[in-house]
Image: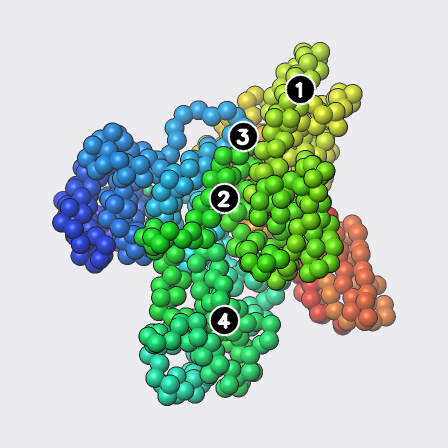
């Protein structure tokens, strides 16, 4: 805590002692005397180099690299070289020490890792995002040496643990980036504990109130659950002991983030989440029998005692997840009527689950390719075929990290792990790019299906090809895997490149006639008009002729309020953005770094609300400065906003919304319940009686006595909305009323 009480000398000694502890505790660090010397030397170098620097919290900077090194050694279980690199990870970026110095002192391996962890410097073209470029560099280094990303995750974890001393807008940006990229990365590498902690910390900073609420409820319900689990486990323990098992039985709550995520996703209150607690049985395997058999034996013991939920059996013992996770999960009914999830793991499986597969991977040298190898290979493919569009690249990485997986079988019964949402064509490309290129359809479970057919876990798929078939660029619309996407792009790269060039030239000529040249603002306008998401796509379509420039005049003069950014409802005055300067200059809107802007009704001309999430006063919002230099407000939960914060976080401004109840904003609510006569009129009557609310549209549907409906309304703020929701919930027959956060009709 208060490091000020200690002199610099004392603090440095503390840090040094932590390193000595680390060496003593970590079995992979003290085996060789050389390693011990290397780590100590790295500490002294980092300590000297960072001397005089402090973190925002007030403690000496050196505690940061030391903490990162401890995570690397103690929580991920890496080797001495990684610990060395972790200690040195910030010296090249922040001090006068060069990579050359590190190479001559610690060798090329350590220097290579430190290089991978050092951010890029220099100027990028306007469209590129420095954040995304840095991320790309990190991935390139990761392919060389997976330890780079593991240390980066440790670095991020420590930064998240100490985030409270950062200013608010940076907290949002860093939390959003963590949630968008780093937590999925940790998951993909099987670092379960780190992933969970990263998610929980992000949530805590992004939505402190909701976090605290769930934490409190979890505390309250944990007593009840502990009793349930205690009573359930008594007979299980008896039988396990009777069969001579050595085991550990633990009860664990789900993480706060995963509970929150489930509540949001399924729109249910905390009380309706039934599998909040899980019981974990970790056994020491008996030597003569395989671990798999023992897992199933324990499963059988448990299900002899309790009824399992039929659709909740998860067998990751026969086929581990691609991040290496192995376990058997089932959900059983306890005598008191509550569901309890049971996870069965051997000690080895538990170690992989907690510390990650990646730490074991490098040293498992039996020449066999593991899933991690395959994954690294797919990242390499992606980097080699990467588009110049850094946002799209980020999307691809994100796609690649998706954890939802399914098993697809080849005609010969071989299993392939594919992301959920993959199509028959994805599967064809997964097997071989040639197969993908000539694919005309597939037999899915012996039934003929088109290329675009979406597969389900357990499908057996035979790809049908024809020599006459040639790949089509449009295929890109129904493949989801990075592999298939980059294959298709690669095939059309040259052709596409030609069109892009031609399109750019055509546009440039057309603009010259009007004494204009291509700039970010014009491109943005055109992209809006023609509904394309990248400038490359715009040029391509112009070049190919699918976008005609005949109407260019009209789209250039069109106000930017069209589809993407909805001007505040009552703003009819036009903000003239045409004479504004450099759109990439954040100072242009007069926001000094770190200040929070207060949004009042009076200031409404200066900002707009994003149509993807429709925030209203009272919501947690951030403001994003778009290419037109307009402040766009997003809900902090909005996925579009998370992506923006992860890629263009320098354009995020923290904002607080104060409403003086002059302007109203669009909100969407969804209702459901049991239908009865005149229900709709009762509901709409209540809304029209509310002075503070205006209805825009109402849509109701009824099926077999159950109704569902959505209502679009204009409202001042979240307080008024809650009052209305509470009133609607009292209407007879209405079971649920929830605000819909995303406007999916848009
Ligand atoms: Mn760092």
Q: How many marks?
A: 4
Gap between marks 3 and 4, in whole Å?
43 Å
Q: Residue at x 35, y 66 (%)?
A: 348
Q: Give the side of residue 640 with respect to residue 11, left or right.
A: right
The residue at the point 19 percent across, 38 percent down is 45
Residue 157 at least partly seen:
no
- Separation of disc 3 and disc 1 at Cα? 17 Å
**Identity of the residue drawn at 46% across and 33% down:** 133
Is 599 above or below relative to 252?
above
Q: Which residue is mark 4?
A: 329
Which residue of the protein is positioned furthest toward the right in this rendering?
A: 677
Mark 1 Cβ inside 8 Å of ligand 1: no
Residue 648 in picture, x, y percent from top left: 51, 36
Q: Earlier in the sequence, mark 2 or mark 3?
A: 2
Q: Position of residue 92 (x, y in %)?
A: 29, 33
The residue shown at (41%, 87%) is 239
Q: Which mark sits nearer the N-terminus, 3 or 1?
A: 3
Q: CA distance from mark 1 to mark 4?
A: 56 Å
Mark with earlier residue (1, 4): 4
Query: Residue 502 got which mark?
Result: 1
Ligand 1 is within 8 Å of the C-beta of the residue at disc 2: no
- The percent position of residue 652, horizontal first and vertical second, equals 51, 38
Q: Earlier in the sequence, mark 2 or mark 1?
A: 2
What whole-number distance in Å separates the C-alpha atoms at marks 2 and 3? 18 Å
Tell me: is circle 4 under 8 Å from ligand 1.
no
Q: Earlier in the sequence, mark 3 or mark 4?
A: 4
Residue 388's disc is: 3
């Amino acid at each position: 805590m208060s490091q000020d009480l200690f002199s610099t000398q004392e603090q440095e000694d503390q840090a040094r002692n932590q390193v000595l502890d680390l060496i003593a505790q970590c079995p992979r660090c003290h085996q060789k005397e050389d390693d011990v010397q290397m780590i100590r030397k790295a500490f002294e170098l980092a300590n000297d180099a960072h001397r005089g620097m402090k973190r925002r919290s007030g403690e000496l900077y050196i505690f940061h690299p030391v903490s990162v090194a401890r995570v690397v050694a103690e929580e991920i279980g890496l080797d001495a070289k990684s610990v060395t690199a972790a200690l040195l990870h910030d010296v090249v970026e922040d001090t006068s020490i060069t990579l050359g110095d590190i190479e001559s002192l610690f060798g090329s391996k350590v220097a290579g890792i430190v290089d991978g962890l050092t951010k890029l410097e220099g100027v990028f073209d306007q469209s590129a995002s420095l954040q995304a470029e840095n991320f790309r560099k990190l991935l390139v280094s990761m392919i060389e040496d997976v330890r780079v990303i593991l240390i980066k995750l440790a670095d991020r974890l420590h930064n998240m643990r100490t985030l409270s001393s950062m200013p608010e807008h940076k907290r949002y940006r860093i939390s959003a980036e963590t949630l968008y990229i780093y937590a999925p990365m940790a998951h993909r590498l099987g670092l379960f504990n780190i992933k969970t902690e990263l998610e929980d910390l992000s949530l805590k900073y992004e939505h402190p109130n909701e976090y605290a609420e769930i934490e409190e409820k979890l505390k309250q319900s944990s007593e009840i659950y502990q009793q349930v689990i205690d009573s359930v486990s008594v007979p299980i323990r008896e039988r396990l002991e009777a069969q001579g098992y050595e085991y550990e039985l633990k009860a664990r709550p789900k993480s706060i983030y995963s509970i929150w995520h489930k509540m949001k996703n399924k729109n249910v209150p905390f009380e309706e989440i039934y599998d909040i607690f899980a019981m974990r049985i970790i056994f020491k395997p008996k030597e003569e029998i395989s671990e798999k058999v023992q897992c199933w034996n324990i499963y059988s013991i448990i299900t002899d005692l309790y009824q399992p939920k039929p659709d909740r059996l998860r067998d990751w013992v026969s086929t581990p997840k691609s991040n290496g996770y192995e376990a058997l999960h089932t959900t059983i009914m306890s005598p008191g009527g509550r569901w309890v999830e049971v996870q069965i793991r051997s000690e080895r499986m538990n170690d992989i689950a907690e510390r990650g597969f990646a730490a074991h991977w490098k040293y498992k040298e039996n020449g066999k390719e593991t899933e991690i190898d395959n994954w690294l290979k797919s990242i390499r493919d992606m980097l080699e075929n990467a588009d110049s569009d850094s946002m799209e690249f980020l999307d691809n990485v994100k796609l690649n990290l998706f954890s939802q997986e399914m098993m697809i079988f080849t005609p010969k019964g071989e299993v392939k792990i594919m992301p959920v949402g993959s199509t028959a064509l994805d599967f064809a490309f997964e097997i071989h790019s040639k197969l993908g290129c000539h694919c005309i359809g597939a037999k899915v479970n012996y039934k003929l299906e088109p290329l675009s057919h979406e597969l389900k876990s357990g499908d057996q798929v035979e790809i049908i090809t024809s020599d006459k078939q040639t790949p089509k660029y449009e295929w890109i619309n129904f493949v989801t895997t990075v592999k298939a996407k980059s294959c298709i792009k690669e095939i059309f790269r040259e052709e596409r490149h030609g069109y892009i060039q031609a399109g750019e030239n055509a546009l440039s000529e057309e603009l010259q006639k009007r004494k204009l040249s291509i700039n970010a603002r014009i491109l943005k306008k055109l992209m809006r008009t023609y509904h394309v998401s990248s400038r490359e796509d715009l040029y391509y379509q112009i070049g190919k002729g699918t976008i005609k420039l005949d109407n260019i005049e009209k789209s250039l003069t069109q106000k930017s309020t069209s589809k993407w950014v909805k001007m505040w409802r009552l703003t009819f005055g036009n903000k003239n953005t045409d004479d504004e300067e450099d759109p990439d200059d954040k100072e242009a809107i007069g926001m000094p770094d770190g200040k929070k802007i207060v949004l009042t009704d009076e200031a409404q001309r200066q900002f707009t609300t994003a149509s993807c999430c429709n925030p209203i006063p009272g919501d947690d919002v951030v403001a994003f400065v778009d290419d037109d230099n307009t402040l766009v407000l997003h809900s902090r939960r909005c996925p579009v906003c998370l992506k923006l914060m992860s890629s263009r976080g320098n354009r995020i401004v923290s904002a607080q919304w104060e409403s003086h109840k002059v302007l109203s904003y669009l909100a969407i609510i969804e209702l459901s319940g049991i239908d009865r006569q005149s229900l709709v009129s009762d509901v709409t009557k209540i809304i029209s009686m509310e002075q503070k609310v205006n209805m825009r549209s109402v849509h109701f549907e009824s099926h077999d006595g159950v109704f569902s409906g959505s209502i679009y309304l204009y409202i001042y703020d979240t307080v008024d909305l809650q009052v209305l929701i509470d009133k609607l919930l009292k209407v007879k027959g209405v079971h649920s009323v929830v605000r819909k956060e995303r406007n999916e009709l848009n």
